[in-house]
Every structure is written in C-alpha cells, then in structure tokens.
Amino acid sequence: MSRSLRGAAVVGIGRTPYVRKSGRSTLAMAAEAARNALADCGLTPADVDGFTCYGTADSARPSQVAHAIGVDDLGWALSILGGGNIVTTTVSGAATAVLSGQADVVVVYRVLGSDTRYGQALGAVEVAGESQFAGPQGYLVPPQWFAMFCRRHQYEYGSTSEDLGAIAVQQRAHASNNPHAVGRTPITIDEYLASRWISEPFRLYDCTYEVDGAVAIVVTSAERAADLPHKPVHLLGAADSNRFGGSVDQWDDLTCMYSRDTAPRLWSRTGLRPDDIDVACMYDCFTFTVMATFEDFGFCKKGEVGDFFREGRATYGGDVVVNPHGGLLSEGYIHGLNHHYEAVLQLRDEAGDRQVAGAETALVTSGAGPYGGALVYGTEAL
Amino acid sequence: MTDTRSLPPQPVPDPDTAPFWQATGAGRLALCRCQSCRVWLHPPLERCRVCAGSTAFEEVAGTGVLYSFIVQHRPTVPGYLENTPYVVGLVELDEQPGLRLPARIVGVDPADVACGMAVRAELVALPGGDFTVPVFRPLSGS
C-alpha cells in the first residue's frame, strides 16, 4: 500500500487581509478567502464538492462556508477538532478525499476572529480533563506550556535567549519584505533581549502575532490541475505523530517535539532529506517551536539552531530559507495554514521581493509538543 | 457578587479524576495506579493503559525533582492576575520516571529556582473554597 499522496495538488490559494481586529464574522472572512482561492484557480463554487477546516469550536463550519459562497450540494464536509497540530492531517485528508474519489475539488480553510479567539481567560474558568490539574496552578495557556519545553532545552543543551532571539530577528527581517505581514518593522537582537517577559524564558518577541483573518487553499487531482491556470503544486507526502494523548506535561522529552517521530516517517515516505528542501515553513507558535522542530527534522544538531540562524544559513543564500513570509511570529497567526499559502506562492515563483530563487521543494510543518505533522510540496510530482 | 477574575480556574472532576480531589481534600496526595502491573497513571484512567488492569488511587511520598519550570510574568490566568511573577514547575515524582505533576513552586525566589531541584509537596486550599491542590517547596539544603 503506497503511503504517498501522488496525484494530488494545490491549484488555488486565497486569503483575507490580516488585521488585529476585523470587526467581521468568521463566516464572512472564511467565505472571502474561499472565493479568492477559487478565483485564483479559475474555478467557481459550482465546481466545488468538498470543504474542510480545523478549529477549536471557534470557526464557521465547512457546510456554512460552502453555502455562503453558493455551493448548493456539498458532497464531502469534514470539520476537525484541533489547532496547529492538525493542519497536516486536514490538508492530507483533503488530498486523500480527492485521491479516493470522495470529492473532486476540496477547499481547505482556517479562519480566526478576535470575537471567538482561543486563549482568552478573562471570565470565570472551569477546567476539565487534564487541564483540571494544571489550570488551578495558574498554568493554562500555550505560551506557558512551550516555555516549559524551552527551559528544559536550555538546561540540557545550553541554548540561550540569544538563540531564540536569532529566530525572532530573522523572521521579522523576512516579514519586512512581505506586504501582507502584520509585523514588518525589523527588530535587533538588543530589542529582542529588552522586550518584556511573558512566560520566562519567553519574551514578547518569542510569541506570535495574533490576528483576524482567513486562508483557503484548493486541492484537486493532478489530472484536473493540468487544465487550470497555475502550475500545480504537488503534495509529495505527509506524516503525523501523536503520543501521550497530546499531554504536554507527560510527553517524555521536553527538549524535542512530535517531529522527533514525524521526521523519519516523512523522510521515509518521500525519499527526501533535509538537504533536498529549499523552503521550510516551520510552524512557529513560538520561537522555541522552530528551534525544537528544526533540530528534529535534521537541519542541524541539538543546540546548534542559534548558530545556524546567526550564520545566515536559514535565509537567502544559506542552506534553507526558513519562513520567508515571517511565519506566525511576524506575518500573523492564521494557525499554520498561512504557511501552506506561502509554500505554494514560493513554488509558483510568485513571491515577489521575497522569492526564494529556484525553489522546487517546500517543507511545511504543523504543531508543537507531542502532536503534529508535516508535509512536503514540490513543483514536480515524485 | 464575587469578581470571577479573582478566582483561579476551578477543577471539574469526572469519574476518573474525582478520587484525586477527594484525597487532596482529606490531606493526602494520591495518584492513580494499576493494581495488576503497578504502573502509575497520570492523568488517571479507569483501566490501565499498559495491561488493562483495574486501577486505584494510592498515596505518593510527595517528593520529586523539578524537571522544568517557568516564571509567569504577564498577568494571564484568572486568580493569578495580581500575583505575578510566580513560578510553575513540572515535578517528576520519585515514584516513577516521567510521572509528572504541574504545580506552583513556592517558598523560593524565582531567580533561585533551577531544574533538578529536589522538592516536596504540600497541600493548600484553592481560592474558591471547594478544592485543595498540591504545591511544591524546595527541600532545604537542595
């Protein structure tokens, strides 16, 4: 049984502006992104028979968004509960639906709105499940969990604030060439080090830029893609892993993440190696997520990420360009689907001032902690 | 009317976790343990994930080592908005490698907290009146 996604491609991409507060519903933003993605590939709502998204009960549902743009008969609708860790599953799930004939054209979207944003804990809070042990301790939200990971990495491998800062500075520099990014003003390492603590060892610039907005991508068969306006971007393979029931507290080694298990699976399924990757859209809910997953995917050894970034190996002219759009840290937090948008833009040679010359492969990772995935896109099918 | 932001998050016990809270309320720190293969299970489960054996709550010594920690500076979590900075750690209990509890680390200046510290649990009332939670304090001389 083949584990490849050979035969599936992304043919269209769309998005809304990213802004701090849009004053718009998630339904309105998702509909705009979906319409833009279809317009991008010359298809109409009548061509679409599949819709899927992920979310944490904070999003308009696939059936609602499809209806809102004029799809009358939706044959395949899948809403997946999860955050950044589930992006790969959602996109590869859409590809699987296409490859198995459950759908011909699938829109994958993610929308975030400030009215429904996860992580706002301003009212009375009750915590069930595993959170009932952590929440009462004042330990409740993602920056705290991944700062906990980061501290252990610093303890075992001697990584430093300066190493985290090198990632933040690099990504902001990339975002300064991205008109769609929310955080475009370059920062220096001194400004990074002077920024206020949030959850120490995380400072302000270790955390993402939360925004309102939506991204949509259109997945169909490579066969169908041949008739559409853009050069298709092929899915070369995907992998996920999930241990400890997703528990960040019980995960066995906080110096690494899901990618410890995902990476060998992905490289095995695609036959690719880190050296083969031109663009790496690394999921970056926090700087440390880039550090841990970058090590796990084998771009460098444990504790070497700071030097890798400082030496210019993670930018243009280096080994691999990491988050040319600025990532969640600087472009904006669209929960990782904006990484897919960027990967497609780069592989279509349409990224303008920030184009990675000759980009043929892009790694897109998703998630942090014990649960996540990654996939590889290519300009040519494997 | 109580200002809801002044209370920390309140646990919602379920059939698997209720014995934990009953034990802390009675002054004991107890965790779920398989009665067949004797592995400790946290979060608790009705049946053992290793051997499917039945489980029960057994008292732990309350001693362990600080695996990692954060210093929370930004007022974020209700009940702690006026208490920053404070330290939260993951304590690896002496009973079993990898058996960890998230808990506040008290009685020590945040600047003096370090991974690897030996710590001991004590039970304190959670504001709100219904629950007792463990916090950990460095063992003297560690």
Image (spheres, rainbow, N blue to C red):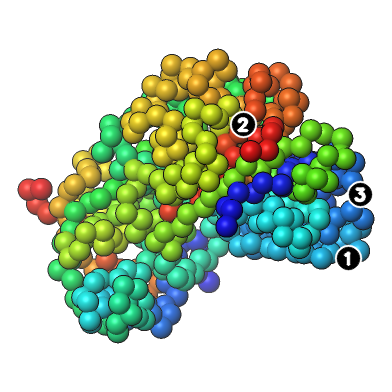
Front residue of A191 and A90: A90
**Type of amino acid at the residue the image marks with label 1:** Asp
Q: What is the distance, in whole Å, between disc 1 and disc 2 at their CAs?
A: 35 Å
Q: Give the class, few, some or many, for how many residues have Cα within 10 Å of label 2's Cα (few <14, many ≥20).
A: many
Q: Position of residue A95 (x, y in %)?
A: 69, 52
Residue that carries the numbered disc 3 in the rendered image:
A44
Give whichever of discs 1 and 2 has the lower sequence position: 1
Q: Is residue A207 left or right of residue A102?
A: left
**Type of amino acid at the residue the image marks with label 3:** Thr
The answer to whether residue A366 is visible is: no
Q: Which residue corresponds to the image point at 27% horizontal and 66% vertical from the top-left?
A: B134
Residue that carries the numbered disc 2 in the rendered image:
A361
What's the chain of the residue with tag 3? A
Residue that carries the numbered disc 1 in the rendered image:
A73
What's the chain of the residue with tag 1? A
The C terminus of chain A lies in which quarter of the figure?
A: top right
Q: Position of residue A89 (x, y in %)?
A: 60, 54
Disc nearest the viewer among 1 and 2 = 2
Q: Position of residue A307 (x, y in %)?
A: 38, 21
Q: What is the distance, in whole Å, between disc 2 and disc 3 at their CAs?
A: 29 Å
Q: Which residue corresponds to the image point at 36% horizontal and 81% vertical from the top-left?
A: B46
